[in-house]
Image (spheres, rainbow, N blue to C red):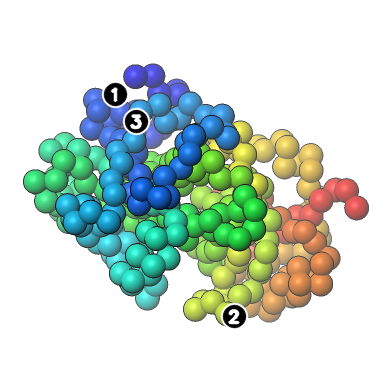
Amino acid sequence: MIINPLLKKADWYTKGAASGDIRPYVFVRPENKIQNPGSRHHSDWFPMEPIYLNPLEIENLEFAEQIYYIEGRAFGPANMAMPRWVFYDCAIIPGFVAGFAMRTSALPANIRQVMRVKDSQEWTPLSLFIIIPTMAKGQWAAHNLCAINSLLPENERLYGLGFLSKAFGLWYANVESCIGFTQWGSPALKLHTHYGHMQIVTAYTPVHSHANTVTYRVEVETPVWEKFFTRQPDLQFLEKYRPAGFEVDPKDEKTMIALHKMVQNHQGPFYLSAADIASKKLTDPLVVYQSKIG
């Protein structure tokens, strides 16, 4: 099996795919299966057949329990762990759940130490991406993304696992437009800006549990994905957008509210730059961009 050489930094994936010990999985009820998966976006990143599991079958409960375990460990410390009923009511029934799994017999000791493992199960999930269709045509909401990397020491993490998990889900489900949410100052911002040019929908979100939440929208573009691995400048972004003349400070709620009022007053649209975010510390002020046209 030939894996795109661009992904060589994610050696866990290239080696695991070659050996057959790593595969993407799709955890979705039969009625929600994607028609013509992977047909909208050109990508040769995922040549292997995914594992399909029906979450409504009791035999697949342990796989769900392992997903709960990763998610709970990842988001529990921030008091944002997903209740079981939310996973069922808001993900399994209306949406699409995907990620990567490793053959249980091939799990290394360091993952076994931090992960819930049941040797009778052929596959153990390594990550989770939940995406839910919205009433806006072609638009899906990215509800949850996490991986075992959050449970491992930094030097033992699987490079790009979270990024590739979301990329696989967007590609497989033929997602045209993705709306999502994260918090200012979160490491997730460094990841989510690499799926398309990130437009700010809300810069301050008091209706959320965490008011300092940014809601973003991206039109999915696979050429942008490559920059996550190459770290090359996104020339298309630089051609289309210019600095708007102000910044948003993850440490200063007033700047979030000021930006949000500008969004609310239709003075945008405004965007964030993946390159700008990548070059700074999580707590540094971020440049806000707008279109060069208009």
Q: Residue furthest front?
A: 31
Is 49 rendered above or below residue 63?
A: above
Name the N-terminal-most of marks 1 and 2: 1
Name the N-terminal-most of marks 3 and 1: 1
Which image quarter: residue 130? bottom left
Name the residue that disc number 1 marks: 18
Q: Which mark is residue 83?
A: none
Cβ atoms under marks 3 and 2 closer than 8 Å = no
Residue 167 horizontal/vertical position (percent): 48, 42
Name the residue that disc number 3 marks: 49
| Residue at the spot 28% in from the left edge and 54% down from the top edge | 55
Is 123 rendered above or below residue 132?
A: above
Which image quarter: residue 115? bottom left
Determine if residue 187 is in view.
Answer: no
Name the residue that disc number 2 marks: 206
Q: Residue furthest top?
A: 2
Q: Give the CA separation, mark 1 to mark 2.
A: 46 Å
| Residue at the spot 73% in from the left edge and 70% down from the top edge | 259
Q: Give the CA separation, mark 3 to mark 1.
A: 13 Å
Per the image, label 3 sits on a secondary structure element best described as loop
Residue 212 horizontal/vertical position (percent): 57, 74
